Every structure is written in structure tokens, then in C-alpha cells.
Image (cartoon, rainbow, N blue to C red):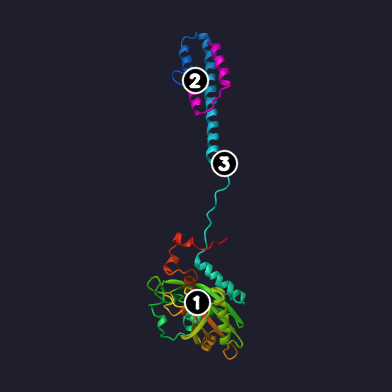
Amino acid sequence: MLDRINALLKEVEVLHAKNAEELEALRIKYLSKKGAINELMNEFRNVSADQKKEIGMKMNELKNKVQEQIKRLKEAFEAQGQSQDEVDLSRTAYPVALGTRHPLSLVREEIIQIFSRMGFTIADGPEIEDDWHVFSSMNFAEDHPARDMQDTFFIEHHPDVILRTHTSSVQSRVMEHTQPPIRVICPGRVYRNEAISYRAHCFFHQVEGLYIDKNVSFTDLKQVLLQFAKEMFGAETKIRLRPSYFPFTEPSAEMDISCDICGGTGCAFCKHTGWVEILGCGMVDPAVLEANGIDSTIYTGYAFGMGVERITNLKYKVSDLRLFSENDVLFLEQFESAH
Ligand code: DAH
């Protein structure tokens, strides 16, 4: 019996299996109920008492060896299986899905670029504002309808903590700490208490412009806006200024550009006029200069304000404003990516 155990020990020393089935066959051969080790156990009963110790120790050695070898082979298979299934170091990388820039960001960036090239710097202001910066300093009369609850969002029912309704508030913030020459644009988000539809939203984006120096005239304003329109919409673009009213400018105007969609011949988008309005502008009212600490006997200035959504509508022919804030990937994916 000792010889047989020694022979098995030798055999087990070089145990090998090509695959999981072979390994299972080995397990059955040695460790199952009818396997070699159990067979020896059965015989062990008949071993004489003086041999029991020696043979018993050998049998234990054999059993441990078999278990150890089968475990080793099993682990080797598992490690191999893993490396085959999960990591192929020679394969090229999966393409990484990169996001695209939001159309409003693209247009805001382009507006900033155009005015930066003309020497404007960027100014920023808070979205949560007070009455002074949004209305009073901008020459809104005490009873002006724009202060009405209808248009303005108030925070916690406090009459002096509001969401700004336009970026003109940043004009005031710049003037209160800067003396002319001032040449800034102020991009930002604004809020109005409007019912949401395809053409109105309760928040949208504007870019404000402000230029104050000695001898600034309406001609300067017109030239800058013409240059902007040509760079934004193409060299053929024409502009037209229509008289208008804003509390903070005098005289005031609204600017139309020749319709980019029909080329000026008339279509549904321009309501068959050949023109579409894109911004408001004017010469800064002397009362605004004075309210913000600038001497209106020395300085004059112009200002303008445009809606980023409006310009994006035109540039990318998006007719429903709501698309800009719904985060629909199918819509967003259509825009030029950031790289
Ligand atoms: N604040 C105006 C609005 O929200 C836009 C505007 C008009 C801004 C004329 C200006 C301006 O600076 O001069 O509708």
C-alpha cells in the first residue's frame, strides 16, 4: 500500500490539465467518493496497527498535495480566462464620446470675440440684484411698468432683492467704480416673469455694450453695430436703425438686420418685411451718467443690448426657444463640437 501511495504522490507532482473539463476529470479521479483517495481510506481500515501511523501520514500528504495542485490549476485557468476576456492590450482604444458646445455658448463666444477685436473688455455682475442697479440707476421712473411684479422675479417677497431683468444693471456696476474711458461688453443671464412659449422664456441671455468717452457720437455707435452685424451674419448684411424708447438712452433705437433666411426678399420669419430686429441701443442718457457718478458735461457714451437667443435663432435657424434649455441630446449634438 505504501508503494501505491508513493506512486500516486509522484503522479500528482506533475499534474496538468489543458482545460476546465480535464481539471474536473482530475478532481473526480482523486477526490470524489469513488476517487483514489477514498479508495485508500477504505483500505486503511485493514492496515495493521504498527503501520497505521506511517501510512496515515503519507495519505494525508497525498490528500493535501492533490488539493493544492487542483487549486493551483484552477486559479491558473481563471487568471487566463480573465486576461482573454477583458484585457486585450493590443486592441486600439474605444473612441471617447466628447460633448459638443451649447449653441448659446457658441454664439455668446462669437459675440465676445467680435467685440474683443474692437477693443471691448468683458464686465460681469450678479444675477441677483437690487432695484437700484436694475432700475433706478438706469433712469426708470418710480412708476415704470417694468418694475411691476408681472415682469420681475422677487426673491422671498423682498422688494429690493430681485433677479435682474436685463444686463443693463452691469452698466451701472461698471460706472460706479470706473471713470471713462469705458469700453465693455457684459454677457449674462437675465430673468423675466413670462409665460413660457416657443418665443418667450422666463430666463434668457443678453450681451450689453457700453462705451463712454469724450466726444462719443451716434455715428460711432452705428459703425460698431454695422461691423458687428457683418462679422456675425456675413459681409452682405445690411442694418437699419428705427427710433425707439428706452429709459436709459436718448435718443434710442432698435436695430434690424436684413433677413438672413430669405436674403431680404421677404419670408415668414421676417414677417415679409425683409428685416429682423436684433438689438436695442442709443446714446446713454445724461441722467444715467450722473446717477452713476460720471460727469455728463464732459463725457458722452452709447449703449446697446442684444438677446443671445435671438441671434442664435437667426444664425442656426432654431425657431423654438425652449429647445435651448431642454437638454435634448439629439438637438445639442447638431452643433459644432468644442475641438
Ligand atoms: N435692456 C434692454 C432690454 O432688456 C436692451 C437694451 C436696449 C440695452 C438699449 C441697452 C440699450 O443698453 O441701450 O430690452
Picture quarter with the C terminus: bottom right
Q: Is residue 339 magenta?
A: no
Task: Report whether the residue tagged 1 is closer than 8 Å to ligand 1.
Answer: yes
Q: Going by the image, does 327 lie left or right of 172?
A: left
Q: Mark 3 or 1 closer to N-term?
A: 3
At mark 1, the secondary structure is strand
Location of residue 120 in the rendering, given as x and y in whole percent from the top left corner:
60, 77
Q: Which residue is mark 3?
A: 88
Q: Residue sitting at 47 percent across and 12 percent down?
A: 43
Judging depth in this view, the residue of 140 and 162 nearest the camera is 140
Q: Which of pointers 3 and 2 indicates the residue nearer the eye?
A: 3
Q: Which of the numbered marks, if any, corresponds to residue 30?
A: 2
Q: Mark 3 or 2 closer to N-term?
A: 2
Location of residue 296 in the rendering, given as x and y in whole percent from the top left corner:
57, 89
Q: Residue sitting at 55 percent across and 38 percent down?
A: 83
Location of residue 58 in the rendering, given as x and y in whole percent from the top left corner:
55, 16
Extent of the magenta region: 1-28
